[in-house]
Image (tube, grey):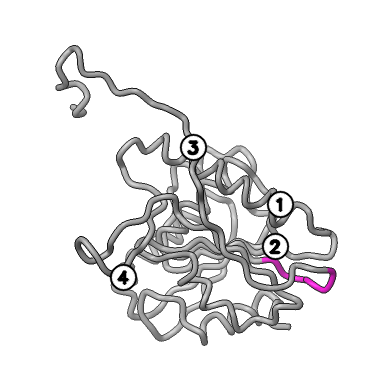
Amino acid sequence: MTAEKNWPDKLKKNILVTEKSARCFTYGEGGEDTRHVWIVMHGYGQLASGVMQHFTGLDPQTHFVVAPEGLSRFYVNGLYGKVGASWMTSEDRELEIKDQLHFLDRVYEQFVSPMNQEKLRIHALGFSQGVATLTRWLVHRKPDIDSIIFWAGTAPFSEIEACTEPFSRVPWYFVIGDEDEFLPEKAVQRHLKNLEEKSGSKIQILRYKGRHRIEAGALSELLKVIGAAS
């Protein structure tokens, strides 16, 4: 039974649509020499500026990185100090998904759509909680993407299964550390099996020695595998 069903008769939830300023960080020139565009979605408790630090070693002439930030920010450790962001919670889940999809559409329209996509390869990468956010955006909006990278995160299977357009047209990669404290090996195997069955895609696994974070060495290896090292 939901909390709403226990409310008094005169207590009513009202939904108002309002404007909100959202942050999106970019790195690179985004010009005629750009060959690879990255859309990167951070994990729970991170900021987009933080996850972007892993990509500033890329050549800014040939790589353009776009990192939107979750619409909710909070203090990670109590009432002050480090600030992180979250893509959504279970509270008013459907509305939060709707808001994030609209935001990601705006990000794509502003930073990616104006570019000459015939010369580009567009890579969508989600880390941790960002994997679920990326999955929902791909399923509901079907943007033009050339590769999908899930890094140490799990996808909402029910939404992939409900998608009428198969994902097999683009390569998928799953990157995971051998000491990931949130995804033990059994969970990884179960997740990959379900993901391949529901998506109809063969997923290439990239493993590295490390924990639940984006490791520089693993990112370098990923660049080689997907042909984006230059």
191 or 2, which lies in front?
2
How many residues crowd mark 4 within 10 Å: few (<14), some (14–19), many (20+)? few
Real-space Cα separation, disc 4 to disc 3, in angstroms: 31 Å
Q: Secondary structure at mark 3?
A: helix
The circle on residue 162 is none
- Residue at image coords 42%, 35%: 95
Whichever of callouts 1 and 2 sits on the residue coming sooner in the sequence is 2
Give yes or no for contact between labels 2 and 4 (Cβ–Cβ under 8 Å).
Answer: no
- SS for dot 4: loop
Cβ–Cβ under 8 Å for marks 3 and 2: no
In the rendered structure, which segment of residues is drawn in magenta?
Answer: 32-37
Crowding around mark 1 (Cα neighbors within 10 Å: few <14, some 14 to 19, many 20+) is some
Relative to residue 194, is residue 165 drawn left or right? right
Q: Compute the Cα span from label 4 to label 1.
A: 32 Å
Per the image, label 2 sits on a secondary structure element best described as strand
Q: Main secondary structure of the magenta part?
A: loop
Q: CA distance from mark 3 to mark 1?
A: 20 Å
Please state which amino acid type lies under the numbered disc 4.
Pro
**For mark 1, what is the residue?**
144
Q: Looking at the image, tell me whether mark 2 or mark 4 is earlier in sequence order.
A: 2
* Residue 45 falls in image quadrant: bottom left
Which of pointers 3 and 1 indicates the residue nearer the eye? 3
Question: Which image quarter holds the C terminus?
Answer: bottom right
- Counting from the top left corner in percent of width and height, residue 136 is at 51, 46
Crowding near pointer 3: few (<14 within 10 Å), some, many (20+)? Answer: few
Whichever of labels 3 and 2 marks the residue nearer the N terminus, that label is: 3
Q: Earlier in the sequence, mark 3 or mark 1?
A: 3
- Report which residue position mark 2 lands on: 122
Instruction: Say which mark, if any, is on residue 98.
Output: 3
- Marks 3/2: CA distance? 23 Å
Q: Is residue 161 above or below residue 126?
A: above
Marks 1 and 2: CB-CB under 8 Å? yes
